[in-house]
Structures are given as C-alpha cells and as structure tokens.
Image (cartoon, rainbow, N blue to C red):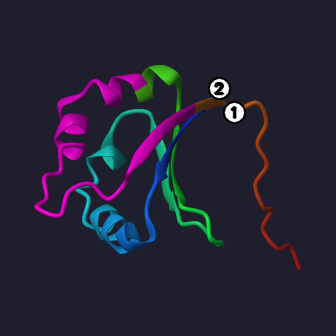
C-alpha cells in the first residue's frame, strides 16, 4: 500500500519566491531513495499562505528510512543569510486507500 507524506508550509507572501527557488535548486537526493515514487511542490492558487510539499512512497517504512537518513539531514539544514522561507510547518501522513489515473486516449 502506498504512503503519502504532505508537509504543509506556512509561507508569508514576501517569502514565496525564496521558497520556490530553494526547492528548484534542491539536491534531489530523494529522487533516488529506495521506495520513493513522487514529489510535488504545490503553490497556493488563491490568497492562502500554505504550500504543500507532497511526496509518495512505497511504504511508511521507506518514508521513515528517508527521514532518518544523512541525505535528509543535509537537505533540510539549508543555511541562508536570509533565514527560513516558511514561518511554520505541519506534517500530514496518509495511506493510499484508493487511486485512479487518467486513461490514455484510445481513438
């Protein structure tokens, strides 16, 4: 059963560009981590101040192994003279109970 972790980041409007630049220049080590399936940074489409960092994994164990890895530690200690982009964070976790994907066009 797949596992999803969503980190909800509260980001003031003046820090949004900084946050997106930091994610764009991320090392990408998670992409080759065993059990990793997908990553998306979701930008608010309205006047909300929350970004969602969505990751999907083969299992909770794969996600936990990533969060306990040295690569995770390196990626999450990004130092900057500008300080943090987010003013708060909350981690939400889910097991995928059902999933559907678009079917290819069969003309």
Q: Is residue 39 left or right of residue 68?
A: right
Residue 84 belongs to the span the image colors magenta:
yes
Q: Position of residue 36 (x, y in %)?
A: 44, 39
Q: Residue at x 76, y 42 (%)?
A: 99
Q: Residue at x 20, y 57 (%)?
A: 83
* Contact between labelled residues 2 and 1, with CB atoms less than 8 Å apart: yes
Q: Is residue 18 left or right of residue 45?
A: left
Q: Is residue 42 left or right of residue 66?
A: right
- Identify the residue at the far bottom of this view: 107
Q: Position of residue 87 (x, y in %)?
A: 38, 51
Nearest to the eye among marks 1 and 2: give it.
1
Q: Please name whichever residue, 47 or 96, is drawn nearer the observer in this view of the structure.
A: 47
- Identify the residue at the far top of this view: 61
Residue 25 belongs to the span the image colors magenta:
no
Inter-mark Cα distance, 1 to 2:
6 Å
User: Residue 107 is drawn in which quadrant?
Assistant: bottom right
User: Residue 101 is drawn in which quadrant?
Assistant: bottom right
Q: Is residue 16 left or right of residue 77?
A: right
Q: Is residue 57 above or below residue 87?
A: above
What element does badge 2 sit on? loop
Q: Is residue 65 above or below residue 13?
A: above
Q: Please name whichever residue, 100 or 70, is drawn nearer the observer in this view of the structure.
A: 70
The residue pinned by badge 1 equals 96
Crowd band around label 1 with a 10 angstrom C-alpha radius: few (<14), some (14–19), many (20+): few
Q: Position of residue 60 (x, y in %)?
A: 51, 23
**Residues in magenta?**
64-92
Q: Please name whichever residue, 43 or 81, is drawn nearer the observer in this view of the structure.
A: 81
What element does badge 1 sit on? loop
The residue pinned by badge 2 equals 1
Nearer-N-terminus badge (1/2) = 2
Q: Is residue 63 above or below residue 56?
A: above
């Amino acid at each position: 059963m797949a596992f999803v972790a969503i980190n909800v980041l509260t980001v003031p409007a003046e820090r949004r560009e900084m946050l997106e630049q930091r994610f764009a220049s991320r090392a990408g080590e998670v992409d080759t981590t065993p059990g990793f399936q997908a990553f998306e940074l979701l930008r608010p489409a309205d006047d909300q101040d929350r970004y969602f960092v969505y990751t999907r994994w083969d299992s909770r164990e794969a996600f936990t192994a990533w969060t306990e890895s040295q690569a995770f530690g390196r990626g999450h200690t990004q130092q900057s003279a500008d300080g943090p982009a987010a003013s708060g964070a909350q981690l939400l976790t889910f097991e995928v109970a059902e999933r559907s994907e678009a079917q290819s066009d069969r003309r």
